[in-house]
Amino acid sequence: MNQASPLLQLKQLTVAPKKTPARLLVNQVSFSIDRGKTTCVVGESGSGKSLTALSVMGLLSKQLQLTSGQVLFNDGESGEQDLTQLDEAHLRKIRGAKIGMIFQEPMTSLNPVLTVGYQIGESLTTHLGMKGDLLKAKIASLLEMVGIPPSRANSYPDELSGGQRQRVMIAMSIACEPRLLIADEPTTALDVTVQAQILKLLDELKTRMNVGMLFITHDFGVVADIADDVVVMFRGQIVESGTKEQVLNHPQHPYTKALLACVPDAEGKNALKPIDYAWLPENQRSPQASNEILVAVV
Ligand SMILES: Nc1ncnc2c1ncn2[C@@H]1O[C@H](COP(=O)(O)OP(=O)(O)OP(=O)(O)O)[C@@H](O)[C@H]1O
Ligand SMILES: [Mg+2]
């Protein structure tokens, strides 16, 4: 058993469209996640956060390719594996079993014609061969763990609220007791009260199950709530990373400072402030500026 290396290490991960390989959508991204810790990846829309997460799981769309890099995963049982080198069959075994995933819109990930209990049970049957009463009891305990009455196992997704559907997604993602959870903006579609409840739930599960979490958000309020470490992305590159305390209280990079200056305060001030790009050379300030010429400023 090798516990020495981090749970997940991204090394120089680079993603580009197959047709335009010079357009680096994710550019030399490196960071790591420890067991029982949450790393938040934060940045504006289009900065490459989701592509980074999809690369980890081997779920990039066919138009895109990993042009370089490694994704080293060490679950403490099978030794360290480079996920970029595994074939699809092998990856499918890891996804859902050792790596759980939670996405933004549960309605698109849940099947409307199957009960939520059935859907929570699917991965338990596939990965662990669970069935019968044991399966039923496990589904009930998972629902309870995420704060849904176990009797709702027989409900269909459209009979639940948005917050309950997100809780079902979380129950599905943790069913097989994964070592790593990847959550891509899991609370963006929810109102603030429900968002706070879901963040609290995820934080509790992290501690309880000692799971490492890759948590994607564009919201520094969420970062303040849930992160241990923070990675700031801008146009495909990491401009700054560190502990939450370092990045939020002592930001070094002008982009991080500009982003933080737009975080609304308690009265909602700053909410509509545009991000200040004065730190960029003039020809690179438009949001459409190409990733290729950015290299010089990071
Ligand atoms: N299949 C694709 N082909 C070409 N470009 C793509 C493809 N998928 C994503 N992109 C581009 O890659 C960049 C990064 O996309 P990504 O989805 O990772 O952004 P993001 O940081 O998750 O943004 P958001 O906060 O809006 O979810 C964007 O400019 C996007 O347009
Ligand atoms: Mg995204």
Image (spheres, rainbow, N blue to C red):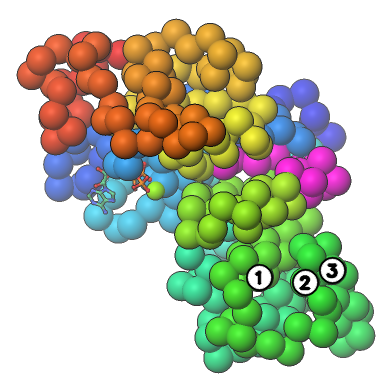
- Specify the amino acid type for callout 1: Gln
**Is 110 in the magenta?**
no
Residue 101 x %, y %: 59, 56
Which label sits on residue 45? Answer: none
Q: How much space separates mark 1 and mark 2, taking CA atoms?
A: 7 Å
The extreme left residue here reads 283
Say above or below: 179 vs 72.
below
- Left or right: 135 as drawn, with respect to 218: right
Looking at the rendering, the stretch of residues picked out in magenta corresponds to 203-215
Return the mark for residue 144.
Answer: 3
Q: Is residue 208 visible?
A: yes
Tell me what residue is drawn at x 30 percent, y 41 percent. 46
Q: Which residue is mark 2?
A: 148
Q: Is residue 198 above or below residue 116?
A: above
Q: Residue at x 76, y 83 (%)?
A: 152
The answer to whether the residues at label 1 and label 2 have Cβ atoms under 8 Å apart is yes
Q: Amino acid at mark 3?
A: Glu
**Rendered image: mark on residue 164:** 1
In depth, the one of 280 and 267 nearer the eye is 267
**Do we see residue 41 in this rendering?**
no
* Circle 2: residue type: Ile
Report helix, strand or loop for mark 3: helix
Q: CA distance from mark 1 to mark 3?
A: 12 Å
Secondary element at image label 2: loop
Task: Name the residue located 54 percent from the left edge and 58 percent from the top edge.
Answer: 191
Q: Residue furthest front?
A: 267
Q: Is residue 210 magenta?
A: yes
Determine whether label 1 and label 3 are within 8 Å by CB.
Answer: no
Q: Quadrant of residue 158?
A: bottom right
